[in-house]
């Protein structure tokens, strides 16, 4: 599910919408290349110590998980240990030899699987400890590391110089990231690694939504009829009540969460009959209502605080009936004497009911939103170790915002601040090209995407027409016998790349293999390419009166990066390259037309949001949409070379 979501978002980055930031060379960044050169002769031996430390951390993580499992049912603990091959882990701790790489990879795959519970801290700590152990085991001895160290530092210094000159130099960023990953794995140049990560590990995705847009999915009129059953001063009251009013969204200032309140304002009119012994009381009531349900969105999900409500009730007794006149006169007198007290009690009871109804309705909405966010986004990423290092919501009186930093092993994040915001946009995005690369590394690396999965992705996730070239099923759901099966195995390293430069977009998919046709084993496809291949397309952004168009610049490009001449296509390659290009022409279409975006569910009420802003430069993509009633022409800069929703309550 998470892989499909990321692949969907990657395609949307090129299809659904169609800044320039100021990057200076500060003194701290200029010194990094010099620091790398100075550290080139400062290799620190210690492979044995790093391996021993990683082994100790693994033992501690296992003990931690063991204690956690003992708090549950014995059969569940035994099941988890079987699943995690506990005996193999114990044997690893007892052995003087490193565990086989196949074992550690199997365990890492199991800990990243889509099983509820693996996102809990004891399992996450074990996954991290196994990854650290595997990294230490693969780092080799000091003699091997020393030779590679000098080469790595020289490459790092050159790449830092290039990146300091041009922070949009994507290839230099990749070289720096690989070098930093290697140094961290081998425990070398720790101060330099920390400085580079601090300088070039800044947030690489920003989102912002206006109060007006959020309100479109939350604010609504209230008109409901409910039954009344109460007891006030010994009188049992029955009747019906009708509330009319509306809910309003209020955003609150908060630096580390999206803080909001759903405010209910309305009036309740009621028609009641009260019974107190032999007396029957007929009355009407009018209650003013104001309720408040606070909500908070954080990286952990959506949370609600208890609702509060204030009500003021006034009543009008228009008839009292009793079996005799004396009792009736006494009842009228007592009703008059107790009216103010009865109204105060009725106000308290109404406030309690309103708060309870707001809590109940919000609880259903919170559960629904968290099922989407926590179960389908957060927890799967946590299990895989790919949840962003920073995922920070914030809010002001006018906007709610998200700031995200997505790192990956051996990859950098953003080198600086994003382009400035367009305050007039109701929905805005600022994405650095590293967020595509880094998420792709963690979610798609080594993943096999079959023709069937791709068709389902386009049809079900993107909800778009599937091109005939990519359609492999018939209308009845059966496989089309005329279509040759195929799949792509994403590269373990850099499976997806993006460049946002000079008013255009460049997207690439990299694969370690490509299959075509049925293999010897049923259900397995036959290998057609077993080397690294890159499939890319470049797009130009063209403004239109209604939005923007992405127009492909030339044909889909096929390269073999590991060859001496990556552009060379041999006669032997010709057939499969033609096959790949034909398939991916349908994915990287000649033209993507963007005329705004629409939402489903509550936010369908926002209507179609018109594209107001689109800029691609200096490795940043800046997008902004505006609700139709205030839409303005698209602005494009010249290049330099869930919301949360809550229902209202009622009496």
Image (cartoon, rainbow, N blue to C red):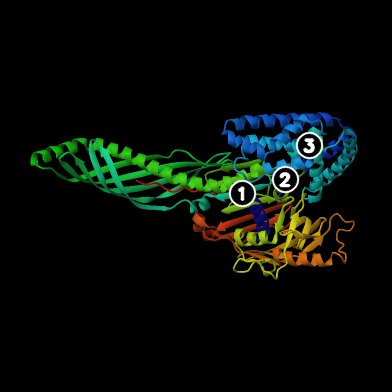
Name the outermost residue toward the left.
Answer: 325
Q: Position of residue 301 (x, y in %)?
A: 56, 42
Q: Within 10 Å of the Cα at label 1, are there few (<14), some (14-19), or many (20+) other Cα atoms?
A: some
Quarter of the image where the C terminus is located: top left
Kindly report the distance in space between the C-alpha atoms of the residues bearing marks 3 and 2: 36 Å
Instruction: Name the residue: 45% across, 45% down.
Output: 362
User: Which of the 4 quarters of the picture holds residue 147?
Assistant: top right
Which tag, 3 or 2, sits closer to the chain's start? 3
Count of numbered badges drawn on the protein: 3
Q: Where is residue 160 in the image (x, y as percent from the top left)?
A: 82, 43
- Residue 45: which quarter of the image? top right
Q: Name the residue under label 2.
A: 414
Of mark 2 and mark 1, the one earlier in the sequence is 1
- Give the residue displayed 79% in from the left and 67% down from the top: 578
**Camera-nearest residue between 306 and 288:** 306
Name above or below for residue 220 compared with residue 129.
below
Mark 3 highlights which residue? 99
Task: Identify the secondary structure beneath mark 2.
Answer: loop
| Spatial separation of the CA atoms under disc 2 and disc 1 | 15 Å
Badge 1 is on which residue? Answer: 207
């Amino acid at each position: 599910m998470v892989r499909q979501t990321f692949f969907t978002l990657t395609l949307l980055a090129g299809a659904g919408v169609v800044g320039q930031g100021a990057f200076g060379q500060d003194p701290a960044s200029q010194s990094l290349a010099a620091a790398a050169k100075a550290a080139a002769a400062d290799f620190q031996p210690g492979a044995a110590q790093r391996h021993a430390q990683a082994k100790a951390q693994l033992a501690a993580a296992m003990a931690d998980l063991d204690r956690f499992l003992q708090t549950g049912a014995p059969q569940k603990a035994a099941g988890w240990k079987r699943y995690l091959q506990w005996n193999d882990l114990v044997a690893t701790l007892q052995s003087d030899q490193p565990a086989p790489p196949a074992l550690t990879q199997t365990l890492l795959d199991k800990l990243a699987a889509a099983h509820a519970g693996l996102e809990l801290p004891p399992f996450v700590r074990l996954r991290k400890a196994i990854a650290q152990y595997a990294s230490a085991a693969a780092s080799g001895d000091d003699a091997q590391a020393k030779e590679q160290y000098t080469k790595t530092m020289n490459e790092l210094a050159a790449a830092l110089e290039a990146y300091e000159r041009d922070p949009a130099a994507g290839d230099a960023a990749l070289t720096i990231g690989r070098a930093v990953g290697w140094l961290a794995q081998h425990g070398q140049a720790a101060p330099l690694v920390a400085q580079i990560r601090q300088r070039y590990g800044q947030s690489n995705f920003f989102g912002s939504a206006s109060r007006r847009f959020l309100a479109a999915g939350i604010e609504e009129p209230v008109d409901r009829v409910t039954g009344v059953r109460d007891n006030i001063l010994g009188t049992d009251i029955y009747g019906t009540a009708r509330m009319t009013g509306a809910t309003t969204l209020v955003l609150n200032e908060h630096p580390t969460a999206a803080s909001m309140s759903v405010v209910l304002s309305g009036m309740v009119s009621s028609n009641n009959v009260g019974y107190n012994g032999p007396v029957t009381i007929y009355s009407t009531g009018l209650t003013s209502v104001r309720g408040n349900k606070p909500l908070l969105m954080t990286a952990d999900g959506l949370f609600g605080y208890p609702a509060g409500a204030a009500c003021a009730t006034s009543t009008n007794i228009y008839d009292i009936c009793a079996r005799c006149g004396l009792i009736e006169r006494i009842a009228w007198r007592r009703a008059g004497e107790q009216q103010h007290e009865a109204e105060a009690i009725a106000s308290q009871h109404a406030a309690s009911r309103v708060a309870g109804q707001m809590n109940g309705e919000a609880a259903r909405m919170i559960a629904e939103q968290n099922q989407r966010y926590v179960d389908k986004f957060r927890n799967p990423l946590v299990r895989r170790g790919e949840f962003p290092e920073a995922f920070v919501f914030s809010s002001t009186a006018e906007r709610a915002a998200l700031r995200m930093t997505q790192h990956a092993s051996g990859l950098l994040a953003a080198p600086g601040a994003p382009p400035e915001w367009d305050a007039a946009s109701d929905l805005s995005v600022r994405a650095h090209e590293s967020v595509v690369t880094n998420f792709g590394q963690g979610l798609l690396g080594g993943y096999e995407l079959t023709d069937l999965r791709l068709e389902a992705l386009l049809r079900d996730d993107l909800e778009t027409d599937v091109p005939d070239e990519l359609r492999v099923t018939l209308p009845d759901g059966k496989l089309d016998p005329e279509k040759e099966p195929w799949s792509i195995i994403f590269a373990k390293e850099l499976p997806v790349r993006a460049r946002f430069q000079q008013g255009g977009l460049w997207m690439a998919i990299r694969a370690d293999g490509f299959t075509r046709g049925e293999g010897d084993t049923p259900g397995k496809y036959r290998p057609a390419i077993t080397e690294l291949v890159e499939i890319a397309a470049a797009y130009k952004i063209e403004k239109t009166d209604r939005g923007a168009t992405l127009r492909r610049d030339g044909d889909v490009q096929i390269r073999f990066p590991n060859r001496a001449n990556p552009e060379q296509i041999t006669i032997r390659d010709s057939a499969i390259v033609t096959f790949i290009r034909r398939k991916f022409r349908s994915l990287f279409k000649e033209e993507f037309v963007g005329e705004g975006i629409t939402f489903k569910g509550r936010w369908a009420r926002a209507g179609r949001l018109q594209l107001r802003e689109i800029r691609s430069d200096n490795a940043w993509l800046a997008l902004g949409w505006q609700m139709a009633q205030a839409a303005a022409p698209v602005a494009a800069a010249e290049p330099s070379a869930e919301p949360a929703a809550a229902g209202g309550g009622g009496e």
